[in-house]
Amino acid sequence: MSELKMPRVRFAPSPTGFLHVGGARTALFNWLYARSQGGTFVLRIEDTDQERSTEESYAAILRGMEWLGLDWDEGPRAGGDHGPYLQSERLDIYREQLDKLVASGDAYKCFCSADDLEKREQAVRDAGGNWEGYDSHCRDLTAAEVAACEAEGKACAYRLRTPTEGSTFWYDVIVDKREFQNEVLVDRVIFKADGFPTYQFAVVVDDHLMGISHVLRGDDHVSNTPFQILIYNALGWKLPKFGHMPMILGPDRKRLSKRHGATSVEEFHKLGILPAAMLNYLALLGWSPGGSGDEVLSAQAITKKFSLKKVNSSPAAFDYDKLNHINGEHIKRLSAKERLVLAKAISDEQGWALDPEWLISGADNTDAYLARVIATLGNRFSSLVTLPEQIGFFFKDDHFVDQESWDEHVATDEARPLMIALADAIETGLDLDQAQAADAFEEVIRTTAEKLGVKAGQLIHPSRVALSGQSRSAGIFEVMELMGARRTVKRLRSAAAG
């Protein structure tokens, strides 16, 4: 593949908020296309909206991109030959291209103020007409009329002179041919009176001068594309290929918003979603790997399978349950060392510490003890959010208790004497000052059950809840081994006492 054929794609967010999942999905698909084709991924910040753009949002976008692992080849921090990569630093470039359009007659000065437009819009609506956004009021001003407006000190914007007949169309790489009748297009502003270009103009100039070959973005931009094509045509530039990806909807099939839950990348980070899982799930929103294979994929595997031909044209629904499932699967597939790193961060945050009196074999410090706990938990460790509830009972007496399970298995007249009997058996049958293996606890439980004439489960179920506060945990014998005989007896007696 020659260098000229290698695609150049971009993600160009506006720093007016956090990195939304819709923007993250757009960035991901561009990144995947670049990586799968040996192309270049450009990050550009479209900050010409001076009123809404903030440094906080700019920083949040970069953090979100880095968290997802979407590295960019050109852009802020990375540099490149097509900079600057912040639009606010490219004003001279936009002005130069505007001058070309003014000289060719494709752009004209507009002296209409916001109040002027509002009054004329109201007049049209009062007369029963439809206001299309602009009425071409300044389109054919004479040189004398322009001079008079300038003499009065009226501020002016610049509008593109659009054709009134024919149509503008393109072959979208995702949804095939799209066509708009030119008569429905209005002369939009391309340069504002404050000296800043509008999005419509700046994006075309940037994409052309940065050599962008494919403009891949959300389908909320479809209505912008014909106007942008007209700007390309007016400047005599070759069009890139356009591809508009389907919208992301909420579970109720309405546009995804805060009412559905978390929507920004950083929110999902705080909810315990792994970046690999988030990337995996975002890829499945509008793209299919094909076949009936596993949907839990690494970034490398997704890149290998990715193709624009497999991007759907219909909207994708965001399924929070599926995201959590994929996240759990990614956690399960981590190595023991990687899981421990995640658990260590939670342990430090919770302030958990090993008590020297616990006498746990093979664990002489908190990290070693935590490693044994995580190893024992195994694939039950599938959520960073629920992990404190799953293992907190190993580190403190004041731990999470599922009240329903407690009432059912512990706080009954049948369970209390059984727990006391088991505590007595452990206390007399095992050395409380020495570490004991899981097999030793199993032997005590089964022997005690036989002596009492009950099934082992009648001791196991209340003991599990008494020790862990939950009806589900790692194997009860392994739990007792990690807790130690002395703590096990103490918990059993405390639970039986009510």
Image: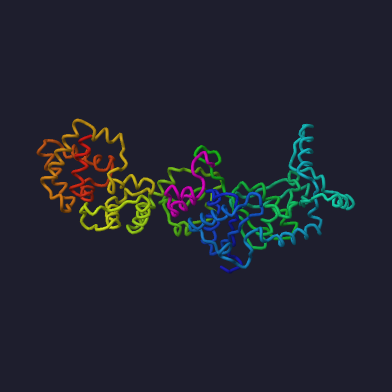
- Would you place residue 494 above or below residue 138 in this image? above
Is 160 on the left or on the right of 81, as rendered? right
Is 478 on the left or on the right of 302, as rendered? left
Image point (70%, 52%), residue name: 198
Image point (54%, 48%), residue name: 20
Tell whether position 85 is magenta. no
Q: Main secondary structure of the magenta part?
A: helix
Q: Quadrant of the N terminus?
A: bottom right
Q: Pick whichever, 331 or 392, lies toward us.
A: 392
Q: Quadrant of residue 300?
A: bottom left
Q: Pick whichever, 411 or 309, lies toward us.
A: 411
Q: Which residues are magenta?
A: 256-283
Q: Quadrant of the C terminus?
A: top left
Q: Position of residue 56 (x, y in %)?
A: 56, 53
Q: Position of residue 283 (x, y in %)?
A: 49, 52
Image point (21%, 39%), residue name: 494
Q: Position of residue 363 (x, y in %)?
A: 24, 57
Tell whether position 261 is magenta. yes
